[in-house]
Structure formats: structure tokens, C-alpha cells
Image (tube, rainbow, N blue to C red):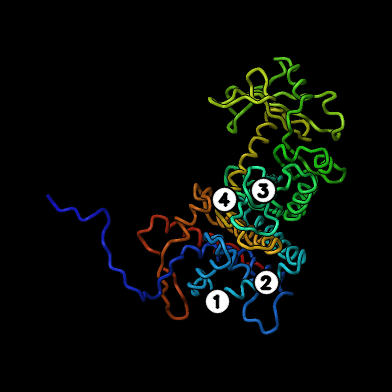
Amino acid sequence: MKKRIGFYPRVRIKGGGRAVVSQAGSVLLVETVRKAGLDTAISVALAPWRKARAVHDPGKVLLDVALAVALGGDCLADVGMLRAEPAVFGPVASDPTVSRLVDALAGSGEKALAAIRSARAEVRELVWRLAGEEAPGAGGTVTVDLDGVLVIAHSDKEDAAPTWKRTYGHHPLMGFVDHGPGGTGEPVAALLRPGNAGSNTAADHITATRLALAQLPAKYRRGRRTLIRADSAGGTHDFVSWLSQRGRWLSYSVGMVITDAIHQHVLKVPASAWTPAVEPGGEIRDGAWVAEIAGDVLDGWPKGMRLIVRKERPHPGAQLRLTDANGMRLTCFATNTPGRPIAELELRHRLRARAEDRIRAARSTGLRNLPLHDTAQNRIWLEIVQIALDLLAWMPMLALTGKARLWEPRRLRLRLFTTAGQLVTTGRRRILRLTGHWPWSSHITAALERLALLPNPG
């Protein structure tokens, strides 16, 4: 019998290795920045904050932090992982320089935020044009999902407050473009709010919607080509009235609270008026039905609003609520989309659940906590997080195919970005050789080839 020596082979560690790149797969993000023209756009936008004889461009500094967040960092100091690989990321500013820039941008208030957002909107339009049929607006419409996110604070930061879940921190309201089942999503709005901010504050939903619309190409801001989806927090008179204003040309699908009036109307709906709910593939959803209710329950709401209710058998073990009826779980939403079957509209609203996937991706990409103390600084951090999430959405959209396009940030980091490589200098060219035995090296090389075929910006 052989003597057991352990599960894993023993290796000897020696320092001083040369020409080894530990984050070789991150060249995918670097090439995405270059092909999208994000480096130029951010540099121009932040030019007013570049001091005379400054060594580092403010746009490059901000992009470096965003790249570090996209690679898994969660604070400004994590930019050091880029500083360790100058062959891939170029010269990277020191930690004090990064902190000074964030302080300067935070001190300028809305001016810096507007500059960063304008650059992102400009680049987004170009990326969607490059993506063609893979872009979220390729079908002629764009869907924006609004949802709140609880961010826990472990120290006494500015505007941190008790939340409705009995935690302590902030309650940002975010908006994401839905890429559908074939991709991830892009952040288009992030409104930083105290932890005790109301979930159904209409003014905050209006502000977040304005921010989201400003990020979309102009052609989607008219002709009802943009759908705004929200849960019951968005089902307020003021927000729905704002969405329905003449000349705004928005479609909406917002959840509604089951009031006593709605509950009484549901009880009066005849059995023949209930239509079976459907699944994304078109098949019937087992144990679920939808119906449209009208009458005085719509009094005081904007003209053209439709109220659609779904009843469904609750899952085993689920407790019924006071608003449920006859052993059925009731949910309700409002929309202004005419002429479409109510089962189709209910399915469209139910797919808003994909926003939870976007929030999960955001939490793993810099939104697990807000690392800075002042609110103005953390607003800049939210913009950095959005740039990182943009890159993590644009890179798969432009370069990956098949199931790889659906990989969330954690899987992208584990399989692609952390791939090791060797940097070889031959003549005047630098070649990055990826490790041959890594199962996903082919994904990286194929993605880089697709990016190389894209036209250069400008």
C-alpha cells in the first residue's frame, strides 16, 4: 500500500518571476474601453479637472478605478492591482492621487456627475450601434427597470440611516436596461438616498427615470419606444401621472398595491373573464390566471390606464396575505399599452424579476458597500460602479457568444479575467501569450478577434 502524501501536489514558491501577467484576461475590458471610445469620452468630459502639468489624466484615473471594480475591487485602494500590471494597464496613479481626484469631483457637485453621465450616454449610443442585432434596442423598444437597493453601512457614514429591513445604511434607487434573456443589463440610473428613504417616493422615481432617459439614444425617447417597469413602489398617483403626461411618450408597467377597492372588484370578476397566464415559451402557466378590471376603481388615475390582476395558487408552504382571496395569491399592475392580450402584458411585467439579477451583479461589482464617508464622494463612487457594470455588459455584448454572454460578473472574473499569461516582447511588438491548458483561453482569444474586427472610434 502506497503512503498517502495528500490531496494536492506540493510546489516550491520562488519570487522574482518576470513577464508574467496575473490578470491577462482583463485585456478584454481594456479592448472594450478602446473600441467603445470610453477612454476618449471620459478624458474630454473630465478635462476641466486636469491641473496644469498633471502627470495623470483624470479620465484615465477614473477609468482605472472602474476597471479595478469590474475585476472585483470594492474600494479606491484596489486600483493597486492595476498598478502592478503596467504592461496591460499602463501607468496608474498613486492612491493619494486617486483620492484627490475623487474629492475634487465630489466638491464640484452636479457638474462632475453631469460630465460623467454625458460621456457614458455618448459611448452607449456608439456601443449599441456596434452591437447591431445584439443591442437591447434592436427590436425597436427599450425596457428600463427601476428598483431600490439596500446597501449596508458598517460605520457612521453621511446619510446612513436605519432601513425598513431593520438594517443600517443607504437605499439607492437604480435603473437598469433589460437585455432580455440573451444578455445581462446596463445601469442607466443610480440615485443615492438615505437608508430611511421611502420605497414609494414619487419624486425619487421621477428623478431616476429622468436620469435613465438621458442615458438612452434620442430615438428611444419618443414614440413610446421606452417601457418603464417598476414594482408596487412605483404605483403612485404622482409617478403614473408624470409617466402619462402628454408629449412624454412613455409606456409603463408598474405594480399596484391591492387596495380594498381593487380587492372587491376582483371578487366580482366572473369565472369566464379569467384568462390563463402564459410562460415565456408560450405554454400555459399552471395554476395562474389574469383578468382586467375597470370601472370606478380607475377614477382619479390617468386616462388610458389599464389595471390587470393575476391570481395564482401559492407555492407550497407560502402563507396567504390579507389581500389574497379564495386561497389564491393576488398581484396587480397598471399599464398604458393598448391593443395587446392581457396574458402577454402580464408576462411582460412578470419578467421585471430580471432586475433582481442586475442587482445581484451590482452587489458583486462595488455595491456591496459604499467605501467613502461623504455623500458627495459616494455619489462619485456610484458613477464608478455604473461604468464598471457598463463594461461588464458591453464586453459580452460585443465579444462573447453562446452561453458565455450570460455569465455574470463573478463567473467572468473566475473564468476569463483571472487567466494567467506571459508577456513576450519581439521587435517593437508586445505579445501576451495565454496559458494553453486553461479551459477558457479560447473564449478570450475569440473575443479579442471579434473586438479587433470592430471599427475604431472616430
**First in sequence: mark 3 or mark 2?**
2
Front-lying residue, 418 or 147: 147
Would you identify the image quadrant in which residue 242 lies? Answer: top right
**First in sequence: mark 3 or mark 4?**
3
Q: Which residue is mark 2?
A: 43
Q: Residues within 10 Å of mark 4 (few under 14, many from 20)?
A: many
Q: Residues within 10 Å of mark 2 (few under 14, many from 20)?
A: many
| 326 versus 206 height, above or below | above
Would you identify the image quadrant in which residue 235 lies? Answer: top right
Q: Which image quadrant: the C terminus?
A: bottom right
Q: Secondary structure at mark 3?
A: strand
Q: Assess whether mark 4 and mark 3 are in contact (beta carbons under 8 angstroms).
A: no
Q: What is the C-alpha distance between the residues marked 2 and 4? A: 27 Å
Name the residue rendered at 71%, 41% in the picture. 229
Q: What is the C-alpha distance between the residues marked 2 and 1? A: 15 Å
| Mark sitting on residue 162 | 3
Q: Secondary structure at mark 4?
A: helix
Residue that sits furthest to the bottom in the current view: 53
Residue type for callout 4: Ala
Q: Which residue is mark 4?
A: 361
Residue that sits furthest to the top in the current view: 271
Q: Which residue is mark 1?
A: 91
Residue type for callout 2: Ser
